Amino acid sequence: MKIKDKDKYVLLHEPSVELLGLKKYTVYILHEQGVPIEDIATLLSIAKPRVRELYKRAFLRMTYEPHWMDGMSIGAINPLWNAGIKTIEALIEAHKSGRLLKLRNFGKARLKEVEQVIKEHTN
């Protein structure tokens, strides 16, 4: 998976483990330093297609501007991101419909974190 027209994207975030997660962060940093995909796959013991996918996800996450996610734990962000909840409006709708607790790896502690974010953004 290649990122088409990579130059048209603007990085809005600095890469960090908190934003990307450890594996995506490692793949992103190594690839940006010029390490070939094949070498990263060997180093991390993962398949080349998976390395490409991790790099693409890391790159796209850094170009997306999720202000409302800033400060949330990666454990709360990942299930939301994987469910396609990328805006505060989508988060509020999912919360009202009760859909959040049905997400994988999303429990009551994460729900409290989301309720705090909603409270901050609706006031």
Image (cartoon, rainbow, N blue to C red):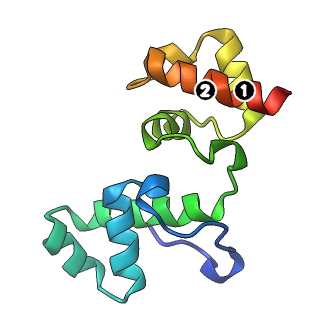
Q: Is residue 85 left or right of residue 52?
A: right
Horizontal side of 52 relative to 109 (left or right) equals left
In the picture of the structure, the residue carrying the numbered disc 2 is: 114
Residue at position x 41%, y 59% from top? 17
Q: Residue at x 56, y 19 (%)?
A: 112
Between the residue at mark 2 and the residue at mark 1, the CA separation in whole angstroms equals 6 Å
Q: Residue at x 60, y 26 (%)?
A: 114
Image disc number at residue 38: none
Q: Amino acid at mark 1?
A: Ile
User: In this orientation, which residue lies closer to the viewer: 119 or 90?
Assistant: 119
* Helix, strand or loop under label 1: helix
Q: How many marks?
A: 2
Query: Dividing the picture into quarters, in which one does residue 27 lie?
Result: bottom left
Query: Circle 1 is placed at which residue position?
Result: 118
Which part of the image, by quadrant, shows the C terminus? Answer: top right
Mark 2 in CB contact with mark 1 (< 8 angstroms) = yes
Residue 48 in picture, x, y percent from top left: 25, 68
